[in-house]
Image: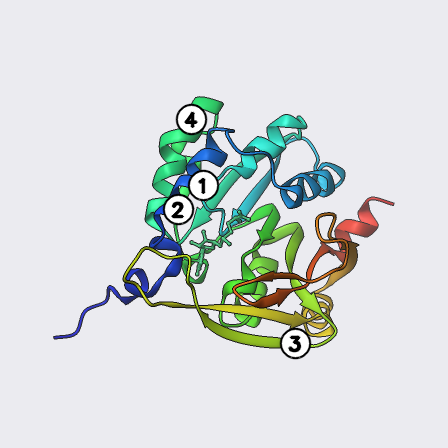
Amino acid sequence: MMRNDAFEKYNTWGHSTALRLLYRQRCRREEPEMTCAAQAADIIADLARPGYSLLDVGCGSGYFYHSLQDRNIPVSYCGIDATPSLIEIGQQEMPKYGLPAENLKVMKLQDLNGSADLVLSMNFLTYLDNFHAPLERLLDIAKVGVILRESISDKACFAYVVDDHLDPGLTLSVHINTYRQTDITDLMTSRGFEVREFMDRRTKGQPEVFLEQPHYWKFLIATRAQSASREL
Ligand SMILES: C[S@@+](CC[C@H](N)C(=O)[O-])C[C@H]1O[C@@H](n2cnc3c(N)ncnc32)[C@H](O)[C@@H]1O
């Protein structure tokens, strides 16, 4: 018997009660703002123009909306995430803060088609099996720019490790990759983007270890070359 439900079966993000609680608390503002979210919002504040749309890919439960609201950044926010239970939390919690439930959608990046002025990928590509097709999709969608906060360094490192933060009795593995910066920037420039780099405010250039894997967090901002020159 063949079935097509393996994504949910193997998707680590859908199998942690602790993660669901944390994401609900972030939606309810019971957790402090993540430093990376604050930094992403500050970067977006510089790029945003009134009426811009922002798509948060791999948004979890959509709590990044709070970081935009707190800074009065004039963008309309939408988030997609492949894990239905995380989107459901956002749809339950975020309307109380002004984000319509329909702005959060269960969707895999692989199925995403459309456009947004700005696209955010925060702690997302790092946990996929590789970056090429996903990053190409983000760049295709972005009319103005892509904001990445991912594990990026001089050397690539690909790991696939058991996630020991899941509910008891589950043994599932997750990709934890560090991508080589020149590989990422080459793809961005080949698609007509100019790239800027920012040190991660939280980790200040030092590796952060999670599941025994070093993460080299960094921000890369890709803006379409013609939109950059239009600003001059
Ligand atoms: C580490 S979490 C990041 C959540 C949020 N961006 C943050 O920084 O707190 C990674 C998210 O990516 C989502 N995800 C994993 N694979 C995906 C895919 N193929 N398409 C869309 N979302 C995906 C997971 O469900 C999870 O919510």
Name the N-terminal-most of marks 3 and 4. Answer: 4
Give how far apart the Cα atoms at labels 1 and 2 are: 6 Å
Contact (CB < 8 A) between labels 4 and 2? no
Query: How far apart are labels 3 and 4 at the CA level?
Result: 40 Å
Mark 1 and mark 2 residues within 8 Å of each other at the beta carbon? yes
Q: Earlier in the sequence, mark 4 or mark 2?
A: 2
Neighbour tally class for label 1: few under 14, some 14-19, many 20 plus, Cα within 10 Å:
some
Tag in front: 3 or 1: 1
Amino acid under label 3? Ala
Q: Amino acid at mark 2?
A: Ala
- Residue, far left: 1
Cα distance between the residues tagged 3 and 1? 30 Å
Residue plotted at (56% across, 76% down): 158
Q: Please name which of the two marks, 3 or 2, marks the residue nearer to the observer.
A: 2
Residue named by callout 1: 22
Left or right, 168 with respect to 222, comes to left
Sooner in the amino-acid sequence: mark 1 or mark 4: 1
For residue 72, what is the image quadrant?
Answer: top right
Q: Which residue is mark 4?
A: 95
From the top left corner, tell me how far across and down residue 47 is, in percent: 73, 41
Callout 2 secondary element:
helix
Residue depicted at x 80% and y 50%: 228
Q: Is residue 88 left or right of residue 39?
A: left
The residue indicated by pointer 3 is: 156
Q: Nearer the viewer, mark 1 or mark 4?
A: 1
Tell me which label, 3 or 2, sits earlier in the chain.
2
